[in-house]
Amino acid sequence: MSEYVVELRNATKTFPGVVALDEMQLAVKPGEIHGLIGENGAGKSTLIKVLTGVHQPDKGEIYVNGEKKIFRNPNDSAAAGIACVYQELNIESLLSITDNIFINKWIKGKSGLLDYKTMHKKAKEVMASLGQEVEPEKPAGTFGMGVQQMIEIAKAVLIDAKMIIMDEPTSSLGEGEVAQLMKTCRELRDRGIGIVFVSHKLEELFELCDRVTVIRDGKYIETRDIDGWTNDSLISAMVGRTLDNLFPKEFGAKGDAALKVEGLEEGGVLFDVNFEAYNGQILGFAGLVGAGRTETMRAIFGADPIDGGKIYVHGKEVQIKSPRDAIKSGIAFLTEDRKGQGLVLEQSIPNNLILANLQGFTKGLFLDEKLIEEKGWESIKGLQIKTPILDEITGQLSGGNQQKVVIGKWINTDADIYIFDEPTRGIDVGAKIEVYNVMNRLVKRGKCVIMVSSEMPEILGMSDRVIVMRGGRIMADVERDSKHFNQESLMKAAWGGTLDE
Ligand SMILES: Nc1ncnc2c1ncn2[C@@H]1O[C@H](COP(=O)(O)OP(=O)(O)OP(=O)(O)O)[C@@H](O)[C@H]1O
Ligand SMILES: [Mg+2]
């Protein structure tokens, strides 16, 4: 028997113009949680897809319990006991939990009819073993992301997976759901299953993993026991150099109230939200997932109808009934839902970069191709978008690099107020610094930046002022030089506590 449940040796995978994997290796033990980390475009998802039979490597071998395997397709990989919870969940929201779990693996009775009684019972059991007390007859779509993810894990458990891969599983979960997922991972580990856990969040890796492998530019760099890694050593292994300042905060000159929100109301969602945001400053919005921060921004941007309240831009009341109105008023909004917000995946990078500001890229009646090319390279360099060519199809980029294109698109608009909702979610440490530098440049040019973030270090590192929300209400409004400008106070407010003067 091999020491490893799954082993990938010397795998190379090329795409046109890109060596996505270059003699890659990964060795996962049974009963361990194995972290996998690397910059955007380093090859994590490609590595996973080789292990799940989605991609066939140009060369290299896969061993399962020491036995060499060839995966021609995902079924081969599943049959060998490898399961994967992809970041894009494969949940049919209209079907019941039971249907989702047993799809293509139906249990039939003697008569040949589907045996729902048994399937519901099993579905309920397996979900309960994952800490979810649910009625399996209900449509999967009526549950939140945390439960939907557990449905995927339940499928893996039911095929008796020896190894479960999770590609950035926490990126769309709230705090409570992350805690439950971690608990489940530990229980699966204790049952002897090997877990591969991909995340850009170093704290998560330190909390959860037994070993961590770092990859860079398609190459294997190093695997160590978790105790052998520090924040600094992980980062330098990942980016190939040391980064000394993760939050390069710079200060602009505080200007006018670019945006003023008065008595914003949205039935059952937002309650009397009042605040001002100034030119030349970054205003952070902190709070737990579901605190109403995104809802506030959507309401301001005209994406959701409001029931009351006024919005002023530079002291003048504006009527914002749709995102078009908001853009006309000089507001740009980078939403947290990157997919829903108009990246055209089958189009090239430059064509996406100009989408939010077509007028800015026309000369007479025609598109200004030279300017588009120039700006395209500027965005690619400035945001470190990893691409072999300028005209690469956006859908071919890695997940994190697609996000950078979205950021580039909004920066190419000439707005006055920039709202960034979770701008660094899913992007690597080096790219985060690039995004912070983009914000710095905006405030230095006198723009107003609002940053919604669930990452406390980033809120504290980059904001001039922080508003904390809870349950659709503003709980605290804290200046950078206040004694409350620290994690403890802001978390207290986020959980509903009041801060003294
Ligand atoms: N189907 C494809 N066609 C062409 N290039 C691809 C394809 N899939 C991935 N690539 C390229 O391979 C490289 C590795 O991408 P991969 O998705 O594995 O990165 P990743 O480490 O998962 O990054 P992220 O953290 O952004 O998700 C990238 O340069 C990407 O553009
Ligand atoms: Mg990826």
Image (cartoon, grey):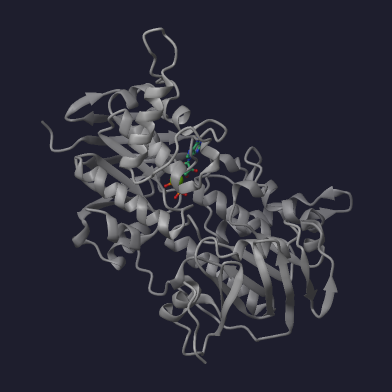
Q: In which quarter of the image is the N terminus?
A: top left
Picture coordinates of residue 64, whole percent (x, y): 22, 29
Picture coordinates of residue 285, whole percent (x, y): 57, 71
Picture coordinates of residue 424, whole percent (x, y): 51, 61
Q: In this view, does 370 lie to the left or right of 109?
A: right
The residue at the far top in this view is 111
The answer, for residue 274, to whether it is visible in the render is yes
The answer, for residue 215, to whether it is visible in the render is no
Residue 229 lies in quadrant: bottom left
Residue for point 36% across, 8% down: 110
User: Foreground: 398 or 111?
Assistant: 111
The residue at the far bottom in this view is 501
User: Foreground: 118 or 261?
Assistant: 118
Position above or below: 169 against 8: below
Residue 124 lies in quadrant: top left
Picture coordinates of residue 476, whole percent (x, y): 56, 80
Residue for point 57% across, 40% down: 395
Residue for point 34% across, 33% down: 156
Q: Is residue 261 left or right of residue 97?
A: right
User: Foreground: 449 or 191?
Assistant: 191
Position above or below: 350 against 62: below
